Image (cartoon, grey):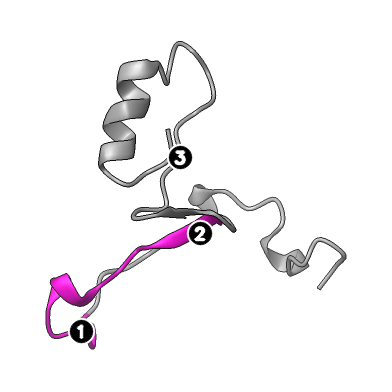
Amino acid sequence: MNKTGLDPQWIGKTFDDFLFRPCKGQISSRSLISLQTQLTRNIPLELPIVSANMDSVTGRDMAEAMALEGVGG
């Protein structure tokens, strides 16, 4: 670990560096899975998705729609 708290093997990696293969899981129902996470100490998210901080991407309507879905906008 370095001072950022990240293991050096993960620094500089992108989605193209990983391959996720489907396999049989241990969960009996998809409804039992939670993707909840904390964006900050006071901001929980239902899904780990945050839109770009750009007017052309996240306008008022988009931010409102995303908030209703429990994601950051």
In which quadrant will I find the N terminus?
Answer: bottom right
Decide whether residue 71 is among the magenta residues: no
Give the residue pinned by disc 3: 50
Question: Residue 39, image x and y in percent?
Answer: 53, 52
Marks 2 and 1, Cα distance to the nearest angstrom?
23 Å
Q: Looking at the picture, which amino acid does disc 3 mark?
A: Val
Question: Residue 65, image x and y in percent?
Answer: 27, 30
Q: Looking at the picture, which amino acid does disc 2 mark?
A: Gln
Question: Residue 16, image x and y in percent?
Answer: 50, 49
The earlier-in-sequence mark between 2 and 1 is 1
Graded by Cα atoms within 10 Å as few (under 14), some (14 to 19) or many (20 or more), the crowding at tag 1 reads few
**Do callouts 2 and 1 mark residues in contact (Cβ within 8 Å)?**
no
Q: Which residues are magenta?
A: 24-39
Residue at 32 percent across and 68 percent down: it is 21
Q: Which mark is residue 38?
A: 2
Q: Which mark is residue 27?
A: 1
- Decide which of 3, 17 is in the foreground and name it: 3
Marks 3 and 1, Cα distance to the nearest angstrom?
27 Å
